[in-house]
Image (cartoon, helix red, strand yellow):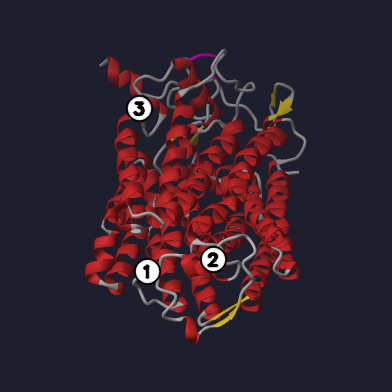
Amino acid sequence: MERDEQKKPLLGDRTSNVQEEEVLPPPGEKFGKRHLLAVLAFLGFFNVYCLRVNLSVALVAMVNNTKKIDNHSIDACPTTHGSDNSTTKQGDLNWDESTQGIVLGSFFYGYIVTQLPGGWLAEVFGAKKLFGFGVLSTAALTLLTPVVINHLGLGAFIALRVIEGLGEGVTFPAMSAMWGKWAPLWERSKLAGFTYAGAQLGTVISMPISGILCDSDLFGGWPSVFYIFGLLGCLWFVVWMFVVYDTPAKHPTISLDERSYIETSIGLKQRVRTPWKAILTSKAVWGICAGHFANNWGFYTMLTSLPSYMKHILNFDISENGFVSALPYVVCCICQTSSGQIADFIRKNGYLSTKNTRKMFMTLGLMLPAVLMFCIGYAGCNHIVVVTLLTFAVGLGGLCMGGFNVNHLDIAPNFSGTLMGISNCLATIPGFVGPYIVGQLTNNNQTRAQWQIVFYICSGVYLAGTILYLLLAEGSEQPWNNQGGDVLTFAGQSSGQAPIQSYDRDVHVSGIPYKHLNEEK
């Protein structure tokens, strides 16, 4: 009986659209259950990107480039850094650049399919199991990769990557839905930014380690990449399932103060019908989709193709390749984490509205990379300048974490998982179109001029995404999020209190109008 009472919302069953006073974290709190969730989710996305990215580096070692060299048009930079690609171990697979582009993009054919179902399933059945099993399925299939390649061939490997994408496709929508129930109003950018920064750290760690493993004799070289990262993903799953809970109300050891703080800040939700028509006709949703698509175009194109550029144009060997290819994601990780913190600070102190804060970070996160990508062609073969431009062109994209990546929670926290599913579904298209275009442009034609076309395309997409986001994005909660009183928001002094009476939306909260919380300036 006591257990059942604990799982009931602390703030009752009535609704109110406002908060009577500014909701503050529990006094003296340093590390709560929501912070533990953030750490484990961070490690989850760390594993997600280790599993996704390792192929980009391993493929360089898996393919035998010497057999294709006579048919290539090559305009590469001279080797000025002491390495020689000719001494790099060659693989056994005779896949040209076009085939490699299809292989690298195949993951995203499956990934795109489960975006919308992932968001909906997370909201209806809970995000914990969906996120956990999404990572587990990808990890388990990754362990099978060497066997499939060596014994079943190219077609089976492509099919395996598609299935891996199906499993991993639910991860971002599930986590967005999870934070819709766990992230207090003024901590959204911070918690989400930290969580998703795990993806960048996974890239930072997996790329150089993959290069070292491929250059070693452990488990035959490149197969060790898939064995080690697959095993890490399985181990993470065990911890996740034992420690994480779907909502604060279900957590058995959360403090009453923290639980009350979270539920008071974000409200309590009921299961309601998804307003599909309102969502699909909302300009705010399409603004998020445009920004997400543009950000992912550059990110996925570089994520899958940068090791190839480093090898064929800049002439880095496999071990150097992994380290240098990881540099952009060090910057990206820093930008993602810091932009979330700064965005929350700006919003909480009223320096900019939520809408203008999101637009500022999106402009910085898209236009700075656009300019830097455009400049790469003018750097010639100066390795230091080219690597620096690439590092910041990709890395500064992490500033978008303060923009579109948490904008779903701003406009519709009740349907944040669904919105993430929609935007990530469209933003997955660059995952297979980008590598395909790179493969077609560079197939038997590995020249700096062809690669510069790749960079120009990225710049153009960044520019278009910036314009559309500035025109369409919103920062306030949309009317359809509250249709029929679906969202329950309460204010109370302490856990266990009855809900307070409803107030007008313009009532002042600590001297700040309530509408400031989801304001429109």
Residue at image mark 2: 84
| Residue under the image location 46 percent in, 78 percent down | 98
Determine if the magenta segment contains residue 439.
Answer: no
Q: Quadrant of the rendered structure where residue 250 is?
A: top left
| Residue under the image location 38 percent in, 58 percent down | 114
Residue at image mark 1: 91
- Residue 362, compared with residue 25, is above or below; it is below
Q: Amino acid at mark 3?
A: Lys
Q: Main secondary structure of the magenta part?
A: loop
Q: Residues within 10 Å of mark 3 (few under 14, many from 20)?
A: some
Closer to us: 473 or 32: 32
Q: Amino acid at mark 2?
A: Asp
Image quarter in which the N terminus is found:
top left
- Residue 111, compared with residue 272, is above or below; it is below
Instruction: State the mark number for residue 468.
Output: none
Q: Earlier in the sequence, mark 3 or mark 1?
A: 1
For mark 1, give the secondary structure: loop
Q: Is residue 198 left or right of residue 93?
A: right
Q: Position of residue 130 (x, y in %)?
A: 34, 45
Q: Residues within 10 Å of mark 2 (few under 14, many from 20)?
A: some
Closer to us: 498 or 145: 145
Q: Which residues are magenta?
A: 492-496
Residue 473 seen in the figure: yes
> Which-is-in-front pick, marks 1 and 2?
2
- Residue 51, compared with residue 34, is above or below; it is below
- Residue 468, compared with residue 67, is above or below; it is above
Residue at image mark 3: 250
Q: Is residue 326 left or right of residue 168?
A: right
Q: Earlier in the sequence, mark 1 or mark 2?
A: 2
